Image (cartoon, grey):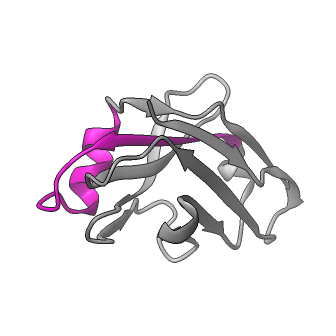
Amino acid sequence: QVQLVESGGGSVQAGGSLRLSCVASGYTDSPYCMGWFRQAPGKQREGVAAINTGTSATYIVDSVVGRFTISQDNANNTLYLRMNSLKPEDTAMYYCAAGRSSRYVGGAGCLIQLRGGDYWGQGTQVTVSS
């Protein structure tokens, strides 16, 4: 059973930066898709970024490309989301997700698969003020 624990959220002013972390436990050696989703009040959950842990293939959605970066630290089973140049519209609860996959799935494919992800964290709040 994979468990995911997010941290790193907080309140920042527009233009600021945050780094979210997601520590995973209960892994096997199988490649996983891991990623970040966010949900703002009154809106649907949306995918932000994803990575194939076996190949390190990544995908970032257009709305945050150039500002957000997804990365992993395999030695510490940790997924990161570096967020720069934050905007008020980035305000949301951010969730880490994971699911078994294969090395033939790219970053974009991972984000699609994770919509029905097997494992989810409890979320970490990001609030950006103007």
Taking depth in this image into account, of 52 and 2 the one nearest to the observer is 2
Residue for point 51% across, 77% down? 66
Magenta span contains residue 114: yes
Whether residue 44 is situated above or below residue 74 in the rendered picture = above
Which quadrant holds the C terminus? bottom right
Q: Residue at x 33, y 40 (%)?
A: 99
Span of residues in magenta: 92-115
Q: Position of residue 47 (x, y in %)?
A: 43, 45
Q: Quadrant of the N terminus?
A: top left
Image vertical order of residue 39 relative to residue 9, above or below? above
Q: Name the one closer to the observer, 82 or 32.
A: 32
Seen from this angle, which residue lies furthest bottom?
A: 66
Residue 130 visible to the viewer: no
Q: Would residue 94 be found to the left or right of residue 44 on screen?
A: right
Classify residue 54 as left or right of residue 60: left
Q: Position of residue 82 (x, y in %)?
A: 63, 69
At x 20%, y 62%, the residue is 106
Q: Residue 77 in magenta?
A: no
Residue 117 placement (x, y as % from top left): 36, 33
Residue 104: give x, y in percent of width and height: 11, 61
Numbered marks: total: 0
Tell me where residue 79 sits by quadrant.
bottom right
Give above or below for 30 relative to 79: above
Instruction: Kindly identify the residue that appears in the image at 71 percent across and 60 percent down.
Output: 87
